[in-house]
Image (tube, rainbow, N blue to C red):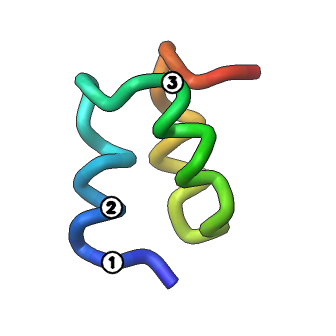
Amino acid sequence: MATEQTRHEAADPQTSPSRLQELTSDQELWALIAAKPSAYD
């Protein structure tokens, strides 16, 4: 379940690609992560 903190991290343009990958374990964050150009394919 996404928390306020993880939602913020997923939306933050400064979040590293490796951290974005860690956040993919939560499906609620997928749309936010997919919108990031720095996210891995």
Q: Residue furthest right?
A: 41
Question: Which residue is labeled 3 in the image?
Answer: 17
Dot 3: few (<14), some (14–19), or many (≥20) neighbours within 10 Å? some
Badge 1 marks a residue whose secondary structure is loop
Q: How far, Cα to Cα, is label 3 from label 1?
A: 19 Å
Residue 34's x, y, as percent? 59, 36
Q: Amino acid at mark 3?
A: Pro
Asked where in the image residue 14 lies, by quadrant, the reply is top left
Badge 3 marks a residue whose secondary structure is helix
Which of the two labelled residues, at mark 3 and mark 1, occupies the earlier sequence position?
A: 1
Residue at 23 percent of width and 66 percent of height: 5
**12 lies above or below 9:** above
Residue 20's x, y, as percent? 51, 38
Q: Amino acid at mark 2?
A: Arg
Residue 31's x, y, as percent? 56, 50
Residue at 54 percent of width and 53 percent of height: 23
Which of the two labelled residues, at mark 2 and mark 3, occupies the earlier sequence position?
A: 2
Left/right of residue 14 with respect to residue 16 in the rendered view: left
Q: Amino acid at mark 1?
A: Thr
Badge 2 marks a residue whose secondary structure is helix
Residue 15's x, y, as percent? 32, 31
Left/right of residue 31 with respect to residue 13 in the rendered view: right
Q: How far, Cα to Cα, is label 2 from label 3?
A: 15 Å
Left/right of residue 5 with respect to residue 29 in the rendered view: left
**Contact, CB < 8 Å: mark 2 with mark 1?**
yes
Question: Which residue is labeled 1 in the image?
Answer: 3
Q: What's the mark number on residue 7?
A: 2
Q: How far, Cα to Cα, is label 2 from label 1?
A: 6 Å
Asked where in the image residue 40 lies, by quadrant, the reply is top right
